Image (cartoon, rainbow, N blue to C red):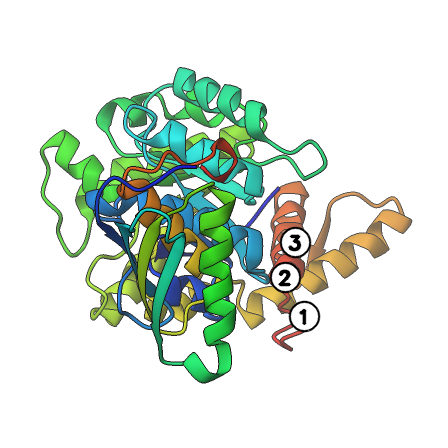
Amino acid sequence: MKKPVSTAQAGTLESNDISIIVSPGEPGKGIVIELESVVFDQFGQLIFEEIRKTVEDQGVTDVYIKANDRGALNCTVAARTLTALARAGVALKEEVL
Amino acid sequence: MDVFRSCLAVPGNNPAMLLKSSSLGADVSMLDLEDGVAPTEKDAARLLLKHTLKTLDFSPSKVFVRINSLDTLGKEDLKAIVPCSPYAIIIPKVETAEQIAQVVEIVERYEPKDKPQIRFMPVIETARGLANVFSVADSSKRIVAISLGGEDFLASIGSKRSRERKELFFARSMMVTAAAAAGIIAIDTPVIDVDDQQGLVEDATFSAEMGFTGKICINPRQVGTVNRIFSPSATEIKWAKRIIKAMREHEENNSGVFSLDGKMVDLPIALQAEKIMYLVRNYGLDREGLS
């Protein structure tokens, strides 16, 4: 399993975007996600799932993710998560590049 | 022949603008990975655009993606974007036909075989590019248009921009002539001052008269004006319909050249009328009740 080697951020706090901060997590803790969202009640679960799936698909574990959502679509959530992972030192799989 | 009037530049790293772009009336959503994206955000923009193209339907706008030049991040951009099958790739800072051949080679590697072939729009932005413009325009069947990057071009020849843009006259003439010779269209450089609506009207009118079929827009407020100026007017449409009707009647009678309202109608006039009606069909002007 891959792990981030540093803390990195992607995305913005502008409308329709999401800010994702990726940091190395505690060993054995898996994927920990902390989410704030302007649409938390309606779409919070979907955003959690999209971040988790994107991270899992890259074979990454023991990662702490802080997300601040401003109404991003799933495609934006995935893209920002991947960018943050790459910036944190995770080698992304060829098919997402 | 592909035709389009307004090409609205949309920064590739801005999700809100990507979402809105297809609803702003532009014929082309020009999704930008090049100058519209900060150097530190190129990686983010590429991934965002790739995921957005897989998800969003941009119709009725056609999707053009402007990549970075091949000597910077262009190859990575093509690898990410080509599998998403945009309508066209905009290739910046083109100076030679060899650069187009390089892009063809990379596109063929990543292009889905079950999707329409991706088209190209090279941008001429230097003196060398302008000197080679016909060989560039004629270098691939994928090329549907060429565009002039006015600001970079002026910098390359050491000229200064004026409001009247007389310093671009030669370059613009070369662009429309090369495009016509290659059987494609020419798209004009944008007006940079987005608050100067009168300047936009004057500049777009002049470029339409020169033979450009459209113009890059750098702000949604420019789209309506550009669409209007590069569309045939109601008078032109009425004229074209009368010419074509009269032409068909004379064809049935095998009468060749004829006159209408006292003016001779020959092949160039007939072609002009047919071109107007081609634009009417492409821009849906019949549906809008303008004809």
Q: What amino acid type should be assigned to the residue bearing mark 1?
A: Asp
Q: CA distance from mark 3 to mark 2?
A: 5 Å
The percent coordinates of residue A59 (x first, y second) are 47, 41
Q: CA distance from mark 3 to mark 1?
A: 11 Å
Residue drawn 51% across the image and 59% down it: B27
Nearest the viewer among B173 and A47 is A47
Q: CA distance from mark 2 to mark 1?
A: 6 Å
Residue drawn 30% across the image and 31% down it: B93
Contact flag, marks 3 and 2 (Cβ < 8 Å): yes
Contact flag, marks 2 and 1 (Cβ < 8 Å): yes
The percent coordinates of residue A31 (x first, y second) are 40, 55
Q: Chain of mark 3?
A: B
Residue extending farthest front: A28
Query: In which quadrant will I find the N terminus of chain A?
Result: top left
Please state if B141 lies on the left or on the right of B194 as rendered: right
Indicate the secondary structure of the residue bearing disc 1: loop
Disc 2 residue crowd, few under 14, some 14–19, many 20+, Cα 10 Å: many
Q: What amino acid type should be assigned to the residue bearing mark 2?
A: Val
Discs 3 and 2 lie in a common subunit? yes
Residue extending farthest top: B98
Answer with mark 2 or mark 1, whichever residue precedes in sequence: 2
Residue B118 marker: none
Residue B286 marker: 1
